Amino acid sequence: MRLYTYCLADKLTPALTPGLLGIGGGNVYLLPLGPVSAVVSEFHGEDLPLTRENVGLHEQVIENILAGASPLPFRFGTLVTEQELKTYCDRHQSSIGAALDRVRGCIEMNVKIITPVWNQNPGPAKPLSLKEGGAGKTPPAGPGTSFLMERAGELKSEEAARKQAETIEASIERKLEGAIRETRVSHRLGQQIFLAVAHLVERRQLARYQELIRELRSEQKDLHFLTSGPWPPYTFTPSPETEPRP
Amino acid sequence: MNEKHQRNDPVNLSEETDLLLLETLDHALNRGLVISGEVTLSVANVDLVFLGLNLLLSSTETIKRTLDETERIQKR
């Protein structure tokens, strides 16, 4: 029998999962594992469908826990046996404890900035031609030269955009200083998301954080902000992508 | 109004719902504790998987449409 595993936390009480149904319709319950508890539900299916409903249930269960604790979420689709879960928690007891201390009393807020208009791709650099050759005798650029010039133009734009993203990132940090515990820049200079930042915010600072974000929006009207949260601290939970390999 | 997004009022409830779903996917599929190296999921909804695979692109298109519409309304 396998367990669908939603999150780990300490200082949990069954009152956080009253009658909650999880993925597959199983009752959500707490599984004590030494100093922590796992929030799980029995899963009897053969496979786990990736559906809106199941993703929503995954999130809903964790947010129920978030209402009274600071959980470390599992990735969607974590199906394990009880023994596998116990082995995992025993093996990683120290790092799980450190991770729980890191997020204790906090939630995650996200800020995304959509590519500003002034950072739209200006297009490739024009190759030299007879008319632009100064003395009028410069031959047209061949395909190789054109490619290099185009690439040079792109690199110059990327460098300028990178510096602009760093400037914006720094201005956000300065504005929110004191209201955030940690920051993680998870994406920069994508096609359309210019900057994506995750903030670990103490619950008691949330109102102040939201007020500062409102001020930031009104101060930087040329930027399109998309903020969301509170979320469980997904980005500040150890994962293969975020933690350095030993 | 969905309280999870702190931004301008939504002009389209379905777009607000899509944004929330995409952000939830971004968190739940890409982050969090991992016990084993792989997670086996079955594809029950091609639309959802498509959205998940094109998370950033489709989400920002929706975001842009919403923001553009919001700005037009505010300028009236």
Image (tube, coloured by chain):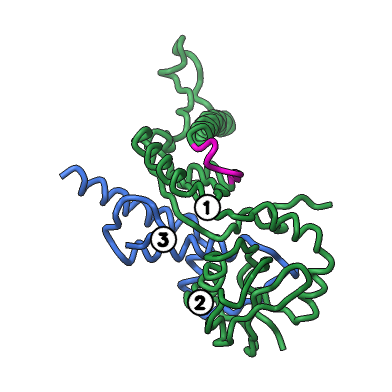
Chain colours: A green, B blue
> Which residue is rendered at x = 58% and y = 31% of the image?
A148
Label 1, on which residue? A203
For the N terminus of chain B, the image quarter is bottom left
Can marks 2 and 1 be said to lie on one chain? Answer: yes
The image position of residue B4, as x and y in percent, is 42, 59
Amino acid type of disc 2?
A: Thr
Q: Is residue A65 depicted above or below B71 in this figure?
A: below
Query: Which region of the structure is painted magenta?
Result: A176-185
Amino acid type of disc 1?
A: Arg
The mark closer to the camera, 3 or 1, is 1
* Element type at mark 3: helix
Q: CA distance from mark 3 to mark 2?
A: 16 Å
> Which residue is rendered at x = 56% and y = 49% of the image?
A202
Residue B37, by quadrant, is: bottom right
Is residue A165 or residue A107 the one in the foreground? A107
* Element type at mark 1: helix
Whether the residues at callouts 2 and 1 have beta carbons within 8 Å, the answer is: no
Mark 2 and mark 1 lie on one chain; the one further toward the N terminus is: 2
* Element type at mark 2: loop
Q: Which mark is residue A51?
A: 2
Q: Which mark is residue B19?
A: 3
Q: Is residue A155 left or right of residue B9?
A: right
For label 1, count other residues whose C-alpha is less than 10 Å away and answer few (under 14), some (14-19) or many (20+): some
Q: Is residue A37 left or right of residue A87?
A: left
> Which residue is rendered at x = 47% and y = 62% of the image?
B22
